[in-house]
């Protein structure tokens, strides 16, 4: 979603986002990030599952950033 959270973010928009994510059949798991809160993710979770609204996701994001480049850095067989 693009917009100024203080002006554009509302329950209807968050729930619509949740319905769009539900169409992905679980391929995307929303978490709080810049401009969203755990409360926002709980609203999105009314429309889709799973969601991650428990705590600060930064450590797991950092782990993913560190872990994912390795498969493309090492030569294969």
Image: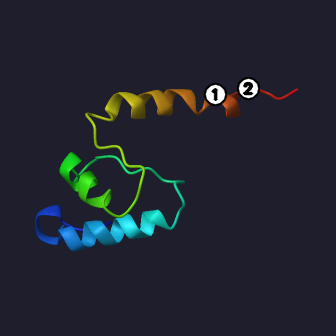
* Residue under the image location 48 percent in, 33 percent down: 65
- At mark 2, the secondary structure is loop
Instruction: Give the residue number, with chain letter if any, for mark 1.
Output: 70
Which of these two is toward me, 50 or 1? 50
Q: Position of residue 32 (x, y in %)?
A: 28, 47
Q: Quadrant of the N terminus?
A: bottom left
Compared with residue 76, is residue 28 higher up or lower down, i.e. above or below? below
**Residues at badges 1 and 2 in contact (C-beta under 8 Å)?**
yes
Tell me how far mark 1 sits from mark 2, CA to CA: 6 Å
Which of these two is toward me, 65 or 25? 25
* Residue under the image location 54 percent in, 54 percent down: 27
Indicate which disc residue 13 carries.
none
Mark 1 burial class by Cα count in 10 Å: few <14, some 14-19, many 20+: few
| Quarter residue 3 falls in | bottom left
Mark 2 burial class by Cα count in 10 Å: few <14, some 14-19, many 20+: few
Instruction: Give the residue number, with chain letter if any, for mark 2.
Output: 74
Residue extending farthest to the left is 6
* Residue under the image location 42 percent in, 49 percent down: 50
- At mark 1, the secondary structure is helix
Q: Position of residue 25 (x, y in %)?
A: 54, 60
The colour mode here is rainbow
Which of these two is toward me, 57 or 68? 57
In this picture, residue 41 sits left or right of residue 28 = left
Compared with residue 20, is residue 44 higher up or lower down, i.e. above or below? above
Q: Quadrant of the C terminus?
A: top right
| Quarter residue 62 falls in | top left
Q: Position of residue 30 (x, y in %)?
A: 38, 51
In this picture, residue 52 sits left or right of residue 8 = right
Q: Position of residue 10 (x, y in %)?
A: 17, 69
Compared with residue 52, is residue 1 higher up or lower down, i.e. above or below? below
* Residue under the image location 52 percent in, 54 percent down: 26
In this picture, residue 71 sits left or right of residue 45 = right
């Amino acid at each position: 979603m693009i917009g100024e959270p203080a002006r554009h973010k509302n329950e209807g928009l968050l729930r619509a986002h949740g319905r769009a994510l539900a169409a992905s059949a679980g391929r995307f798991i929303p978490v709080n990030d810049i401009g969203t809160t755990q409360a926002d993710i709980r609203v999105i979770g009314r429309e889709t599952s799973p969601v991650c609204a428990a705590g600060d996701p930064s450590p797991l994001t950092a782990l993913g950033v560190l872990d994912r480049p390795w498969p493309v850095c090492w030569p294969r067989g």
